[in-house]
Amino acid sequence: MLWGSHQGGLEIRRKSGGSVSLGGRFPYGKTAVLSDGGRTGRPRKERIASRAFSYRVEEPEEDIHLLVGHSYDRPLASRGAGTLVLEDTAEALTFTATIAPAMQEVSYVRDVLAAIDSGLILGLSPGFRLPPRRAVPVSEKITDEGSDPANGKHNAIIRTVLQALLYELSLVTRPAYPEAQIESRNWQPEARPARSAAYRWRA
């Protein structure tokens, strides 16, 4: 699974006996530094192009999860369960996840909510795969940023993800991308929606 991430603040507000709503925003077109190149290598950066996740997001039958730390053993919400709503625009992928009171009693959920309250979990990270070449011949492009010692640039390689298959969004401690907007707020129970029937670039 490929992972990208953005950093932001998390805030939790609850009402006694009520559900918690987590909202987040993954902006497109931002640049993450995946590697500084070490002592002898070239820096590597990554961007997620606008609407890169649209294929699975726009298919309501495709289940997408909200996880803790990219672990399917620690789910928080999902589209299949009717507790995760996604909206994709040219600027960003946004989500709203509902964590029911029963889920708040689960130990890892209590732990992650406490970590958010403490400011230890601040990041949002999407887990995705590149589509097969037979379906999407060009799903990414590699460009050379060029060198400019005066600006601290050292011939970085930039990978832009053009199309990707999004499987999950995760709350993470240490994200790669510098921007994110993740927030939570009080949630009043409403009718739940009906149930819908290549790995990260490395050196």
Image: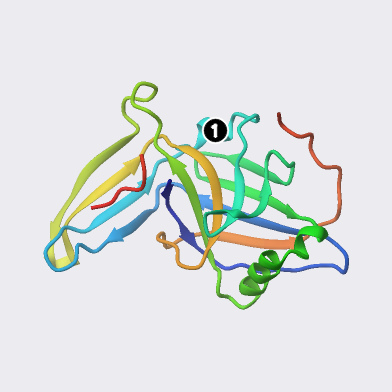
Is 118 drawn above or below residue 177 in the view shown?
below
**Secondary-structure class at tag 1:** helix
Residue 203 or residue 179, whichever sits in front: 203
Q: Residue at x 76, y 63 (%)?
A: 104
- How far across and down, in percent of the image, does residue 16 sit? 87, 69
Residue 164: name its quadrant: top left
Q: Residue at x 52, y 46 (%)?
A: 92
Q: Residue at x 79, y 67 (%)?
A: 14
Side of 9 relative to 177 (left or right) = right
Judge whether residue 160 can be spotted in this image.
yes
Residue 195: name its quadrant: top right
Q: Residue at x 79, y 56 (%)?
A: 100
- How far across and down, in percent of the image, does residue 61 sit? 65, 29
Side of 163 relative to 156 (left or right) = right
- How far across and down, in percent of the image, does residue 80 sit? 69, 38
Q: Residues within 10 Å of mark 1 (few under 14, many from 20)?
A: some
- How far across and down, in percent of the image, does residue 8 sit? 53, 65
Residue at the extreme bottom: 118
Instruction: Give the labeled residue for mark 1.
Output: 56
Is 185 drawn above or below residue 142 in the view shown?
below
Judge whether residue 19 can be spotted in this image.
no
